[in-house]
Amino acid sequence: MAINTIMSLIENKECMEFLRLGVVYVHLVACCVAIGLVLTSDIAMVRDLLKRKAFTEHDHAHMESLQKSVVLALIGLWVTGAAIVGIDYLDKGTEYFMNPKLQAKVIIVLLLTYNGTLLHRLVLPAIQKAGSLLDLGFSARMLALFCGSLSAVSWMYAAMLGVGRPLAWKYSLSELLMAYPVLIVLGFLTMLVLTQRAKRQNTPLCRSGPMQARTTPGNAQEPASLALI
C-alpha cells in the first residue's frame, strides 16, 4: 500500500515539482549559511592576521562552533543535493548525469569535502595550538593558506554553478572549470602577500644601539657594543 502511494506521487509531475522546489529551497539556505560562515571567518582571520592577534579561549570556542556549523551545512548540502539529483534523474533519466555542469559541481563539492577534512583535522588545530597563523612553521603555514584559499573559492564557485542555469549543456566540463584553479592560485598568492606583509611588520629589526661611554673602576672609557634588537 505504501509503495503504491509513493509510486503514484512520483508519477504525479506537479507533486514532484513542489517536492523539488522545497528541496532546492533547503539546499539554497544551507549554501547561504555555509558561505556566510566561511566569508565571515575569512574576514576575521585576515583582520586578526594584520593585527597579529593571538587566539584566546573565546576564539577557541568560536572556532569549534564555526567548525560544527560548517560541517552541518556541508552535510545538508550533500543530502539535499543528492535528493535534487535523484528527482531530476527520475524525470530525465540517465542522460541527466552527462550534464557537464552537474559533473563540475560534484567535482568541486568532493574537493571541498576533502579540503574541509584537512582544515578541521590538521590546519585549524595547528593554528589553535600555535596561537596565530604567523607562528606556524613554513610548511604548515603554506598548507593553511592553500586550504583556506581552496575553501573560499570552492564555496563561491559551487554557488555560481548552482545558480547558473544557462551554463547547463552549453559549455564543456573543462570550460566550466577553467577559471577554478586560476582563482585558487590568485587567492593563495593574495593570502601569501598578506602574511608576508604581516610578518615583516611584526619581525624585530636590526638596529644599532647608541655608543655610550661606560666608566670603569679605573676611570677608563669603554665604548658600548652594537646590539641587535
Image: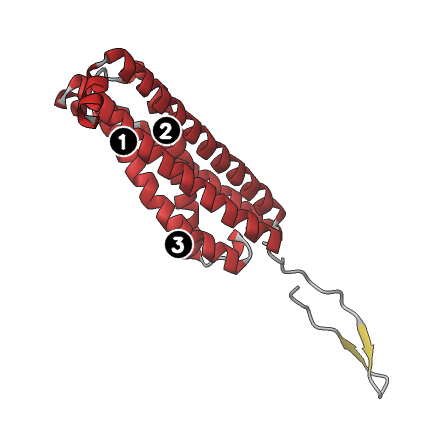
Q: Secondary structure at mark 3?
A: helix
Q: Nearer the viewer, residue 116 or 189?
A: 116
Tell me which numbered mark, 1 or 3, is placed earlier along the sequence: 1
Q: Which mark is residue 82?
A: 1
- Few, some or many residues within 10 Å of mark 1 (<14, 14–19, 20+): few
Q: Which mark is residue 121?
A: 3
Q: The residue under label 3 is which amino acid type?
A: Arg
Q: Nearer the viewer, residue 142 or 153?
A: 153
Residue 90 drawn at (x, y percent): 18, 21
In this rendering, does residue 70 appear at all?
Answer: yes
Residue 151 drawn at (x, y percent): 40, 39
Residue 117 drawn at (x, y percent): 36, 48
Q: Which part of the image, by quadrant, shows the N terminus? A: top left
Q: Secondary structure at mark 1?
A: helix
Give me the C-alpha separation between circle 1 and circle 3.
Answer: 25 Å
- Few, some or many residues within 10 Å of mark 2 (<14, 14–19, 20+): many
Tell me which numbered mark, 3 or 2, is placed earlier along the sequence: 3
Instruction: Determine the residue positioned at 79% across, 70% down.
Output: 212
Tell me which numbered mark, 2 or 1, is placed earlier along the sequence: 1
* Residue 158 lies in quadrant: top left
Rendered view: 55 above or below 90: below
Give the label, 2 or 1, closer to the camera: 1
Q: The residue under label 2 is which amino acid type?
A: Tyr
- Few, some or many residues within 10 Å of mark 3 (<14, 14–19, 20+): few
Rendered view: 8 above or below 177: above
Q: Which mark is residue 116?
A: none
Q: The residue under label 1 is which amino acid type?
A: Ala
Residue that label 2 marks: 157
Instruction: Determine the residue positioned at 45% across, 28% down.
Output: 32
* Residue 14 lies in quadrant: top left
Instruction: Determine the residue positioned at 55% across, 57% down.
Output: 131
Give the label, 3 or 2, closer to the camera: 3
